[in-house]
């Protein structure tokens, strides 16, 4: 997939995560639409004050004009969404299965061998799903964004089955301020999930790669990172 | 208008005057002896009463207790503890920080806090929360999947209860009410001071405005300044619902000791352990020394340091956020009661006077600038 101009972004969800991603995308020069499950009129004030430059739209309109759709709603809300709405779309899954807010979702959610983004992809047969942006706290996403080449730039994992699409999303991740680390498959995106070795941490690329690629040495990697950052702090 | 401490007046950036309120919050964090032995839940609770009484003695405006149901925060019935503090104090305002309304009955919450209001002669407040710590849901048989609807319905009912008079209400989360008189009534036609604690969701800010509750921003990580647009959002949303401006407050965790170094050393191991405990269920990152240095630095969310450092950070953030209230969440699992008493003493006697002075200076200065009588160079 190539674009004559920068891909247009639709962010679905205007809670904690959606506005943070939307602002980063706007700063990087993307056109950004934001939508919830409801009337965009209710989003006007939020958009004007918190995401200036974004267009509040009905979800269907936001999706229709977007090249990349970012899922930034609670996972249980996604399950109520019409899967056909995302047909043929490149979809970034920034959601996590979070029993404290989602309640207990039916299997295969919660099954260790299957990533939650694989379940999401299964529900969206005509879309291409890439997992990223889920493993850094929404309150840290903007704090740690840096221009390419910055010494203290951090990394985000990008997991997907289609190499070309992973590259497209990696370019997006790079533009919004992070080194993209492709993970090979959507299934491999399990390392980005809650409880995984990089969840909730904001690591530099080398530490990120070490943590991800040697999950067995997970604890050691944490220790190393802590030591490393302890010294540099 | 909610009844609030009237000690001095601060003006937010928007020029709306609300009293400057400087308070303390606890979750009843389980404390250790100085030797590091954990105290019983019962002793921890008795200690919180002493902490509340000391808070009044040293000039703190508000003492809040957050509802929790865990071994490390054994504090499920904060209103009882507040009643004990009320019986031994005269001036300090007392409230929840927060009440997990989603898993409680709004009628009972109103009754408990209007009773506290009676006992304390008008000093009770409620801060409602949807519940970012959610251990009360399974405990009382609520399904977490319903948490949004539970909070939406229950805050709306609570707003009706606060208005006073017979209540007629129908919903899905509790039995209907028809012309129900809910007692005890407040005196002199007052309303129970009610706030909504918000963790960063714009929709929650708009809900608070729609229901006419004051806004308490819970900022526990990252740059507090990023919440500044929320104040505008809140005030503009209030205006769009035809409501007058209401105050905005900030809740932030911290620890005060005589020096910056001592405060950090005392707080760090307990903070790391606490976040380790709650990280799994709440999605927090485990703090590293680097993240701790950031959070305790000028841009971060933790108010850890000497009275001077903490006062400066509070005043700066209140100014940046257009807020007129700050509640310091003191303590962290295992910090001894004696250390917490020192923290409270320093907060009341040293931090609060400094913050008041600086807020007043900044307000006076911006008035002068606004009136064209001075500029920053001359004023400095």
Image (tube, grey):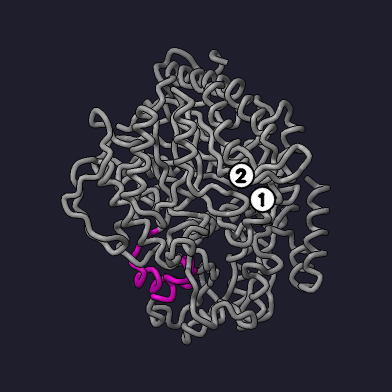
Residue B21, numbered label = none
In the image shown, does A178 or A138 lie closer to the viewer?
A138
Q: Which one is in front in this view, the residue at disc 2 or the one at disc 1?
A: 2
Range covered by the magenta-colored residues:
A55-80
**Where B25 sits versus B355, above or below?**
below
Q: Is residue A212 rendered to the left or right of residue B193?
A: right
Quadrant location of residue A37?
Answer: bottom left
Residue B29, numbered label = 2
Mark 2 neighbour density, 10 Å: few (under 14) some (14–19) many (20 or more): many
**Where B124 sits versus A180, above or below?**
above
- Same chain under badges 2 and 1? The reply is yes
Residue for point 74% across, 48% down: B290
Percent from the top left, x then y, of residue B111? Answer: 33, 43
Percent from the top left, x then y, of residue A199? Answer: 65, 64
Secondary structure of residue under mark 2:
loop
Residue B332 belongs to magenta span: no
Question: What residue is disc 1 on?
Answer: B274
Q: Is residue B16 visible?
A: no
In the image shown, does B220 or A94 lie closer to the viewer?
B220
Q: CA distance from mark 2 to mark 1?
A: 10 Å
Percent from the top left, x then y, of residue B297? Answer: 68, 38
Q: Identify the subunit bearing mark 2.
A: B
Residue for point 68% across, 58% down: A202
Q: Identify the subunit bearing mark 1.
A: B
Q: Is residue A164 rendered to the left or right of residue B217?
A: right
On-image quarter of the N terminus of chain B: top left
Q: Tell me whether circle 2 and circle 1 mark residues in contact (CB < 8 Å).
A: yes
């Amino acid at each position: 997939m190539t674009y004559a101009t920068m891909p247009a972004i639709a962010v679905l969800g205007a809670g904690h995560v959606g506005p943070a991603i939307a602002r980063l995308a706007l700063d990087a020069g993307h056109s950004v639409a934001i939508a919830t499950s409801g009337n965009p009129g209710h989003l006007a004030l939020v958009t004007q004050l918190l995401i200036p430059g974004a267009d509040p739209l009905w979800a269907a309109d936001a999706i229709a004009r977007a090249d990349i759709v970012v899922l930034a709603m609670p996972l249980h809300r996604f399950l109520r969404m019409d899967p056909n709405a995302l047909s043929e779309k490149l979809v970034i899954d920034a959601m996590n299965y979070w029993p404290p807010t989602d309640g207990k979702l039916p299997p295969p959610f919660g099954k260790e061998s299957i990533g939650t983004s694989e379940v999401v992809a299964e529900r969206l047969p005509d879309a291409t799903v890439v997992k990223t942006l889920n493993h850094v706290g929404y309150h840290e996403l903007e704090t740690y964004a840096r221009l390419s080449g910055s010494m203290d730039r951090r990394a985000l994992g990008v997991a997907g089955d289609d190499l070309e699409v992973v590259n497209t999303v990696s370019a997006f991740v790079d533009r919004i301020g992070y080194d993209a680390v492709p993970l090979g498959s959507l299934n491999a995106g399990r390392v980005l999930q809650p409880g995984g070795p990089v969840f909730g941490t904001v690591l530099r690329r080398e530490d990120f790669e070490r943590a991800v690629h040697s999950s067995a040495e997970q604890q050691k990697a944490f220790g190393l990172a802590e030591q490393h950052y302890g010294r540099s702090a | 208008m909610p009844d609030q401490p009237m000690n001095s007046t601060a003006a937010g950036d928007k020029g709306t005057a609300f009293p400057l309120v400087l308070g303390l919050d606890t979750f009843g964090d389980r404390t250790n002896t100085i030797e590091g032995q954990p105290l019983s839940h019962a002793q921890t609770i008795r200690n919180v009463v002493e902490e509340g009484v000391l808070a009044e003695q040293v000039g703190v405006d508000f003492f809040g207790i957050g509802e929790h149901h865990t071994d490390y925060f054994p504090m499920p019935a904060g209103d009882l503890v507040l009643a004990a503090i009320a019986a031994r104090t005269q001036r300090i305002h007392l409230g929840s920080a927060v009440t997990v309304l989603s898993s409680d009955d709004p009628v009972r919450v109103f009754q408990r806090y209007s009773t506290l209001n009676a006992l304390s002669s008008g000093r009770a407040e409620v801060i409602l929360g949807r519940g970012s710590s959610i251990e009360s849901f399974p405990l009382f048989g609520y399904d977490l999947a319903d948490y949004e609807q539970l909070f939406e319905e229950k805050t709306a009912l609570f707003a009706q209860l606060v208005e006073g008079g017979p209540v007629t209400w129908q919903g899905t989360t509790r039995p209907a009410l028809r012309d129900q008189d809910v007692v005890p009534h407040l005196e002199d036609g007052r309303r129970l001071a009610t706030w909504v604690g918000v963790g960063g969701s714009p929709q929650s800010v708009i809900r608070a405005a729609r229901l006419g509750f004051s806004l308490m921003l819970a900022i526990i990580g990252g740059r507090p300044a990023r919440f500044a647009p929320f104040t505008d959002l809140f005030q503009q949303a209030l205006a769009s619902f035809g409501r007058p401006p209401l105050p905005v407050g900030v809740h932030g965790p911290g620890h005060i000791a005589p020096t910056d170094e001592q405060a950090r050393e005392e707080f760090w191991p307990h903070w790391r352990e606490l976040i380790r405990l709650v990280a799994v269920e709440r999605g927090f990152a485990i703090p590293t020394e680097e993240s701790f240095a950031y959070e305790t630095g000028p841009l971060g969310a933790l108010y850890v340091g000497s009275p001077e450092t903490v006062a400066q950070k509070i005043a700066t953030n209140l100014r940046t956020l257009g807020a007129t209230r700050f509640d310091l969440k003191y303590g962290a699992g295992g910090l001894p009661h004696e250390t917490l008493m020192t923290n409270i003493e320093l907060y009341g006697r040293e931090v609060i006077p400094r913050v008041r002075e600086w807020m007043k200076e900044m307000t006076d200065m911006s008035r002068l600038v606004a009136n064209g009588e001075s500029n920053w160079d001359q004023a400095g």
